[in-house]
Image (spheres, rainbow, N blue to C red):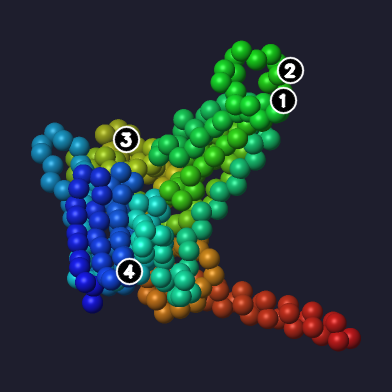
Amino acid sequence: MPFKTQKRDTADALTIEWILPVKHYKLAFDKARCVGCQICSLACPKDAITLAKQPKLQGEKAKRSKIDVDLSKCNFCGVCDVTCPYGAVRVTLNDKHALNVVEKESFPELIRDIKVDTRQCPKECVTCEDACPLGLIKISRVTFDGKPVENLDALSPSQKSHIQLNLTIQKEYCPTCRVCEFKCAPGVIRVRKAYEGKISIDQVKCPEGCSDCLDVCPITGALYLSDGKVQVNELFCDYCGACKAVCPVPEALSLKRTKVLHTPVHSGTWNKALERITSPVDAVKELKSIGSKKAQEMVKRRCVTEEIIR
């Protein structure tokens, strides 16, 4: 048992701690990054994380759901840290990032597959930097000898042709919404979604004049208003569920996660989490797919071995 426990809820973060003689566990939710989505609460094996709708006054915009953690249930396993698409959760041991479930190989890591090819990027372009809804992209330019370019307009065409463009993405916080990929020049950025799924809004059941889901959606363009009704653009949706968490009519907004892009793993802990994040049916589909791939790999290895023997 911990020597001391502590819970703090400030404007910037929700933090819980276990303090032992030689170990200090800490779990922190960054409120600036947390979008009040459903994923960490669904993945938590101890049901320690809960979501609560925040009240709003008439005429106000909806607020993102509030996260809370039951200190008596949390064991600082790191599942919430691993599965958060926005990198809003961090679990540390003695102030160092520590993911117990990953270290024990009982849980995978979320893959943020983002590839950048700046060779096809116009030297003066900042479209992707402006387009990122979370401000995670930074463009910088340097001369051939490594000096930073302060004023691009002051350079001659020949000087501009020798400029090196650097495009940096804070991948650990990126929900892989793909806005940058489609706003940028073709071929510069390639993104695979970490979470795949389906989302739809039943316009008949959707309350007249309601835009709560749009108010809390963290991705510009994933939801939008048309003829007074909220519409969905699945191209940019990351299926986090922040919209579903605040919808006043549960049947009006349907959201289903069908696939998670992750590192290889096979364990009961992950299987249970996958069922809750997606569904039992989709979890079985993934497990069957993994089994099929392993069988194919075994056949290939056997064929290679037989060929060598011959």
Residue at the extreme right: 310
- The mark closer to the camera, 2 or 3, is 2
Whichever of labels 2 and 3 marks the residue nearer the N terminus, that label is 2
Question: Which label sits on residue 158?
Answer: 2
From where the camera sits, is residue 186 visible? no
> Tags 1 and 2 in contact by the CB under 8 Å rule?
yes
> Tags 3 and 1 in contact by the CB under 8 Å rule?
no
Q: Amino acid at mark 2?
A: Ser
Depicted 282 relative to depicted 308: above or below: above
Look at mark 1 in the image and give the residue it sits on: 162
Crowd around label 3: few <14 · some 14–19 · many ≥20 (10 Å) = few
The C terminus lies in which quarter of the figure? bottom right
| C-alpha span from label 3 to label 1 | 44 Å
Q: For numbered disc 4, what is the local secondary structure?
A: loop
| C-alpha span from label 1 to label 2 | 7 Å
Crowd around label 4: few <14 · some 14–19 · many ≥20 (10 Å) = few
- The percent position of residue 278, horizontal first and vertical second, equals 39, 65
- The mark closer to the camera, 1 or 4, is 4
- The percent position of residue 163, horizontal first and vertical second, equals 68, 26
Look at mark 4 in the image and give the residue it sits on: 23
- The percent position of residue 71, horizontal first and vertical second, equals 21, 66
Q: Amino acid at mark 3?
A: Leu
Residue at the extreme front: 21
| C-alpha span from label 2 to label 3 | 46 Å
The N terminus lies in which quarter of the figure? bottom left
Q: Nearer the viewer, residue 164 or 50?
A: 164
